[in-house]
Every structure is written in structure tokens, then in C-alpha cells.
Image: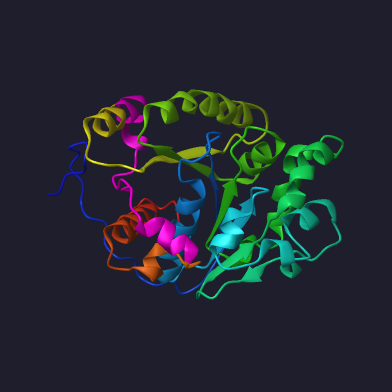
Amino acid sequence: MPTDLLGRDYETFAAPEPLQQHGPARVIAMCNQKGGVGKTTSSINIAGALSQYGRRVLIVDFDPQGAATVGLGINANAVEDTVYTALFNPRMDVHAVIQHTDFDNLDIMPANIDLSAAEVQLVTEVGREQVLAGVLRQVKDEYDVIIVDCQPSLGLLTVNALTAADGVIIPVAAEFFALRGVALLMQSIEKVQTRINPSLEVYGVLVTMFTHTLHCEEVLQRIYEAFQGKVFHSVISRSIKLPDSTVAAAPITIYAPNHKTAKEYREVARELISKGIVA
């Protein structure tokens, strides 16, 4: 039986069978208030891997920087209707916001700098924590998974994502400073569970930017001690191919399918399916 980098035994997750029907979607918030830990990269590449396994995937770009939008080849500044439009125009058909990408089974709800105004505007909205949930309700039955790529903060946008989500994936870079903010994030998740969304789960902690150094291995061990069985078996290696694939505006699983990092993201996708988190 193979072991992961923490020495845990696990069965290799088999490639899943194609689905005969699609939906309703499982909504996953990709969340960590620290920037630069691989949230957007992981959102795009897990989505890419799942789409190649025949799952219909929608990425919701919920970051005013619009990195996920650009990372899938869409000019964020040239898009008229974005997730911001959908949030504040309740009569709008959400389908008019969704953009098809160049990749089968993979769509995106784009974002641009307009979304930066949403934090202030949401303060005066009725049911302000549940606005995104209302938007996604219109399209949940059409997808197998919806991945919300959150901005690096714990403001109202992130609370909206946690309220709309069935579960959270927390990307954590294999660096000491990346560990420090996770406790604060867990407090926010617990508050949302207690007050708004009691069914919210932590699906797992995904270790990113890993290299075989003593520092990274110590951080990995500390993450495991803190989260035990919640740590994904697959660890994402630091690789120049990831920024290369971003420049090419394609998931690495499509841009460089035989690369080590592509295989790692496919393993994450298989683990999600094997555990029943994604159909």
C-alpha cells in the first residue's frame, strides 16, 4: 500500500467513472485570508482535473483581482456582466454572467475590480450574508461542483462564500507564516457554522508550494498535527510549470498533463470524488 509524505497508508484513488447525469452541485469555497498560498491556482487546476473526469464545473471568481478569470483566458476588464452584477441585480439571469471557457465542462463566473465595491454595498443589503447563495441557487442543478475562489480576507465577501458553500478547502503554503492565519480562519468558519450555515464542513487542508526541505517537512508535520485526517494525501509541489500554465491561460492538467504537478492535482480531484465530496 502506498504512503503519502506524512507516512499515512492509503489506497491510490482510482480514476472515476463518467457521470450519467449532472447536478445538483456541491459548492466548495477555496478559502484562506492569507494571500499567495495558491487559492486561485488550486481552484483552476482542481476544476480542470474534475472537468477532465467528466464533471461539469463552475468557478466563481470572488476576488476583485480577477485572477481566476484571467487565468482561464478571459479579459476581466472587457466583461460587462460579472459576479458583481449578479449580486446586486436580483432580476438578472445568472446565465448571462457565466462565461464558457475553451475547455470542456469548465465555465466561470468572472470578476473584475468592480467587485471591490461589494463589501461596502453588502452592508446595507437585506440578508447580506446570503446574497451569493441566492445567485448560485439559480444554476446549482446544472453543475456537479461549484468552486468559489475567495479573496484573501475575512470580510463580507468571504462570509458570503462560506454561507453559500457546502464545504471549505483551505490551501496552505508549506511555509511557517502561512500557518499563522489558519487559526483565525477556523474561528470564522466556526462562527458561520454556528450562526448561519450549520451544515458547513471543512473538506480538507491542501498543502501547496512544497519542496523537499527540512522547513517544508516540519511545516507539513505541524499542519498534520493540527488537522489530522483533514489533510489531503496529495501535496502540491512548487513548480515553474504552474506560472507557465497561468500565462498560457490553461489548467496545468491540460497545459502539461504529464507533469508531476498535474498528476498531483488529478490526485486531489480523485480524492474528492472517492470521498464523496464531489459526485
Report whether 37 appears left or right of 115.
left
Quadrant of the rendered image containing residue 154? top right
Q: Is residue 269 magenta?
A: no
**In the image, which residues are magenta?**
222-247
47 to 40, vertically: above or below? below
Q: How many discs mark residues in the rendered view?
A: 0
Which percent across, then down, holds residue 18?
Answer: 39, 72
Residue shown at 82% from the left, 34% from the top: 123
**Whole-percent x, y for residue 250 in the image:** 47, 67
Q: Where residue 145 sits: x, y (%)?
A: 53, 59
On the question of residue 53 being in view, the answer is: no
The answer to which of 253 and 2 lies nearer the viewer is 253
Can residue 137 be seen here? The reply is: yes
Q: In which quarter of the image is residue 208?
A: top left
Magenta highlight on residue 229 = yes
Where 161 falls versus 98 (above or below)?
above
